[in-house]
Image (cartoon, grey):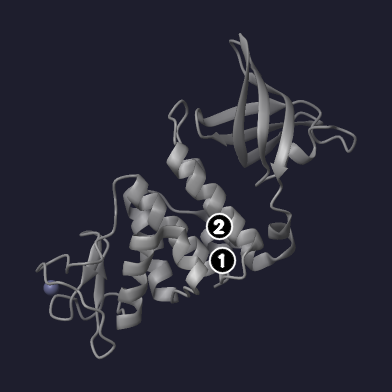
Amino acid sequence: MAQIKTNAVVIGRTDYRDNDRILTLFSPERGRLEVLARRAKSPKSPLLSASELFCSGEYVIYESREHATMVSCQVTDAFYPLREDYGRLSHGTLMLEMCRVVVQPDQPEPRFFLHFLRSLAHLAYGAENPRSVTAVFMAGLLSLNGYRPGVRKCAVCGTNLIPDDGKKYGFSVGRGGILCDECRSAEGTVLCGKDVADMQWIMKEGLAALDNGLEVSPAVFYLLLEMVKNRLECTFQSEKMLTL
Ligand SMILES: [Zn+2]
């Protein structure tokens, strides 16, 4: 029975009764939280903007034995431009869906929270291709959850991978890394030298790679998506909405 204050982002919401909403919040200290937002659908409600998807702010929550209720919220960023661009929105929606799977109740995730918040900022305000932003987001998600993709050595024979546009490379989701020309399977993903260089850059620089004009290919995007689905053992409905 206590009132808590926490930074959080709305990563999910469902309508409840006539005017209420149940929000799924991602809090760095508390992980995933389900919170009742009373009368949040009413146009005059002070909770209206704080109960929109992607909204980030400082939430004040009252916790009773039965449920948690939002008391108020100081909105810090609504990431409004995401709602005005279908391509960016589709990528943001995929990020929310991934967060709903990864983030668990009562499990603090401060580093992943920061990575998610910065990724949303790039997606909403940056000039980068949304595909590149989501690729870097997924690479960080994998790394922070113990599934860092292998990009420096072939995942089968261990040869150092020196990106060369005269060669072809592969990727093994099962082994979690890039394969050299000799070890790749003929029917699997084919990557070029630039793809390998981009993957190495992403794993080294994280989101900072975006500031230097990173533009990943659909092949890199999809191999990261396949690896996330494989490691989290799930599929994402919003994948169908994606525009690359
Ligand atoms: Zn090899």
Amino acid, disc 1: Leu
Q: Residue furthest right?
A: 44
- Location of the C terminus by quadrant is bottom right
Q: Position of residue 25 (x, y in %)?
A: 59, 35
Reading the image, the residue beneath label 2 is 238
Residue 93 visible? The answer is no
Q: Residue at x 61, y 8 (%)?
A: 1
Q: Position of residue 137 (x, y in %)?
A: 46, 56
Asked which quadrant contains residue 130, the reply is bottom right
Q: Image check: 145 left or right of 6?
A: left
- 201 above or below 217? above
Q: Image check: 77 left or right of 201?
A: right
Amino acid, disc 2: Ser
Q: Assign a secondary structure to mark 2.
A: helix
Q: Residue at x 45, y 44 (%)?
A: 112
Where ligand 1 lies, by quadrant?
A: bottom left
Q: Position of residue 168 (x, y in %)?
A: 25, 84
Pick whichever, 74 or 94, lies toward us: 74
- 59 above or below 84? above
Reading the image, the residue beneath label 1 is 242
| CB within 8 Å, label 1 to label 2 | yes
Asked which quadrant contains residue 206, the reply is bottom left
Badge 2: how crowded within 10 Å, few (<14), some, or many (20+)? some
Q: Position of residue 173 (x, y in %)?
A: 27, 62
